[in-house]
Amino acid sequence: MEQSVRKRQLIVLAAGGLIVSALSAAHYLSPIARRLAAGSEVDLVLLGGGSPVLFVYHPFSKTVNAVRLPGRTARAGSAYQRAGEVLKAFYGPGAPVREPAYLEVPETDPDAFEGVLNNWRARPAVLAALVRRLYELKRTGATNLSSHDLALLALELSRMNSSDLIREDLDRVRSSVRPGPAETEGTPAQVPQAVRLEVLNASGRKDLAVLATKFLRAKGFDVINFGTYGGAQKATRIESCPENIEAARGVRDALGLGGLEIYSRPGQPAIAQVRIILGADFDAVKIEKTERGIK
């Protein structure tokens, strides 16, 4: 009897070990998991009737930009090729290549996605229907995402609501940033109004990202995403793609951050050209006075 119990325990342990190993391997091989772990943006292209839609998910702030592209962007080729054309049209032909992830659906309607975000907590059947739909897409080959990737995205979705969805159009998001004139000592950089920013609060103080966002928008910057950073940071940090250094300097000057070092963010393209992470050292007095109208 004791031998039989021990044998069953060994079988259960072995089965559990195989499941854990399989999940670990799937997680390790998943490009979505790697991007989420690194805090990088995740792209998902919606293909189908009407114009394609690109969803760009920001893990740190748990927000999504939904960008509708012209219908002519992805007309011919396989779904994989069309999704690649959407990324090329959005990020530009010179941007580093990013592996396209796609879903083929009857209608590319962001309203349906917003409806899920609005209603799934009150009506869990809405989320259950979405999960069934994703399973059906996977079964019929209408997506190149693995079941593991789909489960990860569904989990991220469960942390969001409709206020986290930011709709964009291609022309506004891809408005070019022209370098300003050469900086001289003591002269702020000249920054175009089209600079796209992401503002994240890592200070531990409530509503600091909201306050900084209002301040920067009043200065003419296009803050397309703001929220809370993944953890507390002592020092404020500005990150920029190499070609947007002038824009990053303009953000630094607008916030009165003097000679704060700007960190280069090479590699994969991003929807935001400059990211500012507000640390515990950030002095909000200036922008608080501006918000109250105090000179």
Image (cartoon, grey):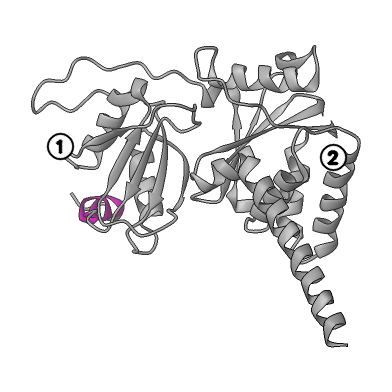
- Which residue lies under the disc numbered 2? 138
Tell me the kind of residue under disc 2: Lys
Q: Is residue 7 above or below residue 95?
A: below
Few, some or many C-alpha atoms within 10 Å of disc 1 (few <14, some 14-19, many ≥20)?
A: few
Q: Secondary structure at mark 1?
A: loop
Q: Tally the marks.
A: 2
Judging depth in this view, the residue of 172 and 259 nearest the camera is 259
Tell me the number on the disc at residue 259. Answer: 1
Tell me the number on the disc at residue 291. Answer: none
Q: Position of residue 251 (x, y in %)?
A: 29, 35
Tell me the kind of residue under disc 1: Gly
Q: Is residue 97 magenta?
A: no
The residue depicted at 60 percent of the width and 52 percent of the height is 163
Distance between the Cα atoms at labels 2 and 1? 51 Å
**Looking at the image, is mark 2 or mark 1 nearer the viewer?**
2
Q: Quadrant of residue 178?
A: top left
Which span is picked out in magenta? 283-291
Q: Position of residue 243 (x, y in %)?
A: 36, 20
Q: Quadrant of residue 105?
A: top right
Residue 125 shows in this picture: yes
The residue depicted at 34 percent of the width and 41 percent of the height is 216
